[in-house]
Image (tube, rainbow, N blue to C red):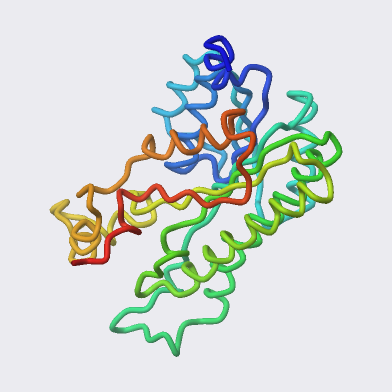
Amino acid sequence: MDLKEINKIYDFSNRTFVITGGTGVLGGEIACALVGLKANVAIMDRNPQLEEKVLKRIETYPGKAVVIFGDVLDKSLIQRSAENIIREFGQIDGLINAAGGNHPEATTSSNHSFFDLPIEALRKTMDLNLLGTIIPSQVFGKYMAERGEGVILNISSMNAVRPLTRIPAYSASKAAVSNFTRWLAVHMAQEYSANIRVNAVAPGFFITKQNRFLLTDEKSGELTSRGKSIIAHTPLGRFGIGEDLLGAILWLLSPAAKFVTGIVVPVDGGFSAYSGV
């Protein structure tokens, strides 16, 4: 590979990516990076409002972004969104399944026993993370299968590898996402095209809207006991920020990873490598 080809690897001109859960912290960071690399990006979310700072960044970049309302658990709605994206950009080259999360009622505590966790809360968490990855992959993956080309990137979690206390449904569903990633990678390559790749990243501990006040005190901003424990078990000694994911994500979406499929890449500051002693 010569220098010109290397320089082209991260030029995403005329390529269209869909990001589910795209108005969240991590989704927004991914969207900014792709638009900055000249991609077309369809940001799909139940909350169709981008943060002002993200919107301002995107507006100055050379690519193009649109925000589309979508619910990852509503297949017919996702299908209509896909049709709108095709009309807007002509094709779909990649899917980033960034939608996911935990339900507060699916979390154990001193007042909330595992034995009493509501089934509905457990189901919502499992559905959001697992079916919320599978359903968009069905819809957008079909377009890729018809073209014989594309890339799907899922967001797993360190919880899939080393489940945390208190969040059983979230941990189990993210483990399922990792398993599904490997299954779909084989299926798409063998049944449709070797030019369709499926991978995942497994973030460690990043501050998000959902977990901010589990890891830091709402009033003082100091670390909670849980936050301190996480930092103590993270060799790099800090929480991740959105941009820390970009190297792995852009690599997996790019031609640089054209012989990579079916893997789950940890981006965790060394958390998964540390035994605690």
Tally the marks.
0
Asked whether, in this view, residue 253 is left or right of residue 162, the answer is right
Asked whether, in this view, residue 190 is left or right of residue 17, the answer is right
- Residue 251 pos. (x, y %): 52, 33
Q: Who's the residue at 37% across and 53% down the image?
A: 204
Q: Nearer the viewer, residue 62 or 263?
A: 263
**In which quadrant will I find the N terminus?**
top right
- Residue 14 pos. (x, y %): 68, 18
Q: Nearer the viewer, residue 230 or 214?
A: 230
Q: Who's the residue at 25% across and 60% down the image?
A: 230
Q: Who's the residue at 58% across and 60% down the image?
A: 177
- Residue 91 pos. (x, y %): 77, 28
Examine the rendered structure and indicate whether residue 209 appears above or below residue 49: below
**In which quadrant will I find the C terminus?**
bottom left
User: Outermost residue toward the right?
Assistant: 146
User: Outermost residue toward the bottom?
Assistant: 115
- Residue 205 pos. (x, y %): 34, 53
Q: Quadrant of residue 252?
A: top right
Examine the rendered structure and indicate whether residue 161 appears above or below residue 30: below
Asked whether, in this view, residue 98 is left or right of residue 183, the answer is left
Examine the rendered structure and indicate whether residue 74 appears above or below residue 98: below
User: Outermost residue toward the front?
Assistant: 1
